[in-house]
Image (cartoon, rainbow, N blue to C red):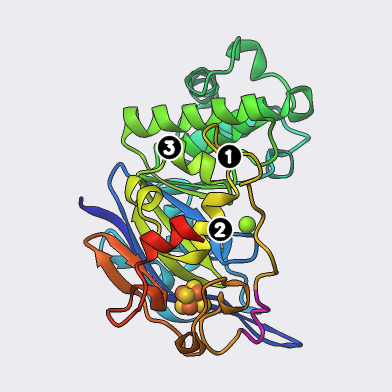
Amino acid sequence: MQPVLSVENLKVIFNTYAGKVQAVNDVSFSLGKGEVLGIVGESGCGKSVTTSAIMGLIPSPPGQIPSGRIMFEGKDLIKMSEKELRSIRGNDISMIFQDPMTSLNPVLTVGLQLSETFMLHQGLSKKQALEKAVDMLRLVGIPAPESRVLQYPHQMSGGMRQRVMIAMALACNPKILIADEPTTALDVTIQAQIIDLMKNLNQQLATSIILITHDLGVVASICHRVMVMYAGKAVEMAPLKELYAKPQHPYTWSLLRSVPRLDMKKGSLESIAGQPPDLLSPPPGCTFMPRCRVAMEICKQPPELATVEEGHTCRCWLVDENSPYAPATLFKEC
Ligand code: SF4
Ligand code: MG
């Protein structure tokens, strides 16, 4: 698959009064054309910071990108000027955020907010832009779009507002859509509708999508490939089916066990014990060690990202060639 985006050895730090926070630490991945990549992990693991870096939205100071490249159409987004980035944001790469209420302007009708995008980026007249806004609302499944364009955000339900956000993000037919926990603030039925909508858009328009979530259930319903992040690092990456069938990293096991399934034995649903490490002073070895049930002596040294199979990588001593264990068997046993 031809990548539309590739992130190489990205590091993001935040300089705070308490010291340097290593929010993203040497993360690399690519996104194929028409691919849906899921980035999963608990809050504070670096998912949102990674995508903010792609959007050029890391506030500096306190943020800093000491190394790494983010290649899009042959150019490094990190090296671009704010002006160049502005022409890419919204046009080529757009983003939908978790909370539609804070991202929409409460004092403008949704029609006006949408049509502004068309006037600004596509040079349409006011009338043409409003017609296009109606079309976009129809595309994202909003009923009676002709009257909805005249409404203000507070007159809509949460699910409806999230659809408006998606319509805005899609307004310029972006090559990449980044969705940061797009369904977290919504109830389950609406969640499913929004995910279906994103799936249709991916299939019909071949939009590449990066979906950030902590919910492996959501990931299973839409993603082609998954990257699991922990404490600012990618700890496992694999095609969806492979990750579910042969998870290698103990953190991935915990994530999988915390998703309810119909075939689960009573009592086997888990929460993940312990807390993610303080990124001001992460543990010197494997950052998951304090919470890992199968930690070994060697885990006091940091594990490197290793290839398990083509397309499947994992950062854990269990997959090392000298490891005494087979991770897939351990997952079933412990
Ligand atoms: Fe657990 Fe060791 Fe693997 Fe870290 S490297 S996840 S401590 S087994
Ligand atoms: Mg986040």
Q: Could you tell me what secondary structure mostly forms the magenta stretch?
A: loop
Is 9 located above or below residue 224 in the figure? below
Name the residue carrying label 3. 222
- Among the two numbered marks 1 and 2 on one chain, the one whose residue lies closer to the N terminus: 2
Dot 3 surroundings within 10 Å: few (below 14), some, or many (20 or more)?
Answer: many
Q: Of residues 26 and 264, which is closer to you in this image?
A: 264
Q: Furthest-front residue in view? A: 333
Q: Do the residues labelled 1 and 3 touch (CB within 8 Å)?
A: no
- Among the two numbered marks 1 and 3 on one chain, the one whose residue lies closer to the N terminus: 3
Please tell me whether residue 141 belongs to the stretch shown in magenta. no
The alpha-carbon separation of the residues under discs 1 and 2 comes to: 16 Å
> What is the three-letter code of the residue carrying label 1?
Lys
In the image, the segment drawn in magenta is: 277-282
At x 31%, y 74%, the residue is 306
Report which quarter residue 19 is drawn in: bottom right
Please tell me whether residue 279 belongs to the stretch shown in magenta. yes
Name the residue carrying label 2. 254
> What is the three-letter code of the residue carrying label 3?
Ile
Q: Where is residue 269 in the image (x, y as percent from the top left)?
A: 63, 46
Dot 2 surroundings within 10 Å: few (below 14), some, or many (20 or more)?
Answer: some
Query: Can see residue 119?
Result: no
Name the residue carrying label 1. 265
Query: Can see residue 152?
Result: yes
- Among the two numbered marks 3 and 2 on one chain, the one whose residue lies closer to the N terminus: 3
